[in-house]
Image (cartoon, grey):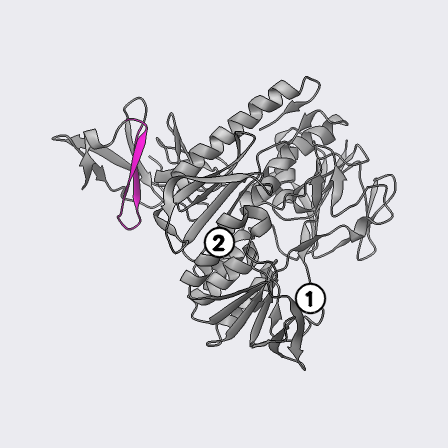
Amino acid sequence: MIPVCRLEDLPEGESVRVATAPPIAVFRTEDGELYAIDDTCTHQDASLSEGWLEGCLVECPLHAASFDLRTGEPTCLPARRPVRTHRVTVEDGVVHVHLGAEEGTAA
Amino acid sequence: MRTVTIVGASLAGLYAARELRAQGFDGRLVIVGAEPHRPYDRPPLSKDFLTGRTDESRLSLADADETAALDAEWLLGVRARGLDTRGRTVLLGDGRTVATDGVVIATGAAARRLPGDGLAGVHTLRTLDDARALRAELTRGPRRVVVIGGGFIGAETASSCARLGHAVTVVEAAPLPLLPQLGARMATVCAALHRRGGVDLLTGSGVAALRGATTVTGVDLADGRTLPADVVIVGIGTVPHTAWLAGSALALHDGVLCDDGGVTALPQVVAVGDVARVGGTRAEHWTSATEQPRAAVTNLLAGHTRVTARTVPYFWSDQYDSRIQFAGRYREGDAVHVTEGEITDGGLPGPSGFLARYERDGRTVAVLGVDRPRAFMRARRELRRAEGQRDDRRTAAPTDAVA
């Protein structure tokens, strides 16, 4: 379990990058939901935490691949492989990421 | 339409195949490729592939499942040699012919050559085989590398060579690198990136000749100087692959001339990617090669131009640990303002990069981001939205723009 930041420091519609290995991107959607996925686009080297967030989709800033934050699945080319998803909790006002156990799981 | 032949098995050709199947074409699909390889991604060749950070398995553009789903006949390692005047027969280099109802031309472009570049040690960087050969040579110990041309390929290759520990000089004929693409102020930043990366940049220097008997030993400059070199990389632009279309009914002028929808002089022949001059522009951008096939395939299947492929041009370049992203159309005389972040006194991007806007007649026509991806993405979206609105006002049916 990795502490990320205080919830109020992650406004709705924003994201934060956690410098784990590999790095993780944590998103807070406009609806207030929290999601965490691997930060590096599966197509090429770009940080998804710098991407465009719309609903539950994030668009890669380099080539516009798009991923569903809920499943990690790509929703359009050029990405063809999913990113890993990670569970997010808030404890005492602090956002925590729970690292997904397996490579390639999308749940 | 029972048979469609895609000539060219790279990015634009693959995307055309995907679009044909996605748009319901269930006939015979033939894909002709001059290279022996299945479609692969070229941008990493000058970057992570050259430095060894990525390998060939990561370059593949389609996996086995997708390839099977496309249900295409792949004719690889064979060049197209001609297209008959009716556009119904593709002639292949090995003497075979393919009878077809529709043709997608996606033959791309070749690296422009320099006289005398047959010497050992002289490279271009366009194909996987080019990159393999250069990578092999760069792993044989420190080399004196001269890169001719300070454009994207030149800058990225120079950056990769410097990262590998070679002594690198870039020779650029213009007063600054990337001057026509970015304008003087931003080109100055790119010049500073070369220097930050420990690379010598010689600007305003034309190349007179390559020196050497069988192996290159140096580069003679027009001003009389000679740069000693073990490896020379020629990055002076491209020539579209259109020679095979001589004698066809298609209009050729630095590319295959098409309308805004990718349709050529023959309605059942469309062109996409680096070889296509769409609505007057040959874009040569990765993103254009992925966007144009949608409209071109729609029009091919419709038999006339029903939609246009007008988009805001976009390209990116990774050099010396900086990421440059550009969207829009720059013209000489546009005013350039840094609107976020900063450029340091040394001409380098500040610690959190910068965003610059190009303005003409009071509106933004292009945006440039250096190490500022989030701001760039927002600005690029604004630009696309603004252009879309202008297009909506300008065009009345029958053609609809597709994203």
Q: Which mark is residue B58?
A: none
Q: Is residue B142 left or right of residue B91?
A: left
* Front residue of B257 and B193: B193
Is the Cβ of the residue at disc 1 closer than 8 Å to that at disc 2? no
Tell me, yes or no, whether the highlighted magenta stretch contains residue B368: no
> Residue B28 or A56: which is nearer the viewer?
A56
**Residue B111 location, x and y as percent?**
66, 58
Residue, disc 1: B114
Tell me: residue B242, above or below residue A57: below
Q: Name the residue type under label 1.
A: Leu
**Point 56% across, 57% down: residue:** B153
Residue range corresponding to the magenta coloring = A12-28
Residue B88 against residue B246 in the figure, above or below? above
Position of the N terminus of chain B by quadrant:
top right
Q: Residue at x 38, y 36 (%)?
A: A72
- Give the residue at x 34% y 43%: A39
Q: Position of residue B27 (x, y in %)?
A: 72, 34
Give the residue number, with chain letter if any, for mark 2. B188
Q: Amino acid at mark 2?
A: Thr
Disc 1 on helix, strand or loop?
loop
Residue B285 in sight here: yes
In three-dimensional space, the C-alpha distance between marks 1 and 2, rounded to whole angstroms, equals 26 Å
Chain of the residue under label 2: B
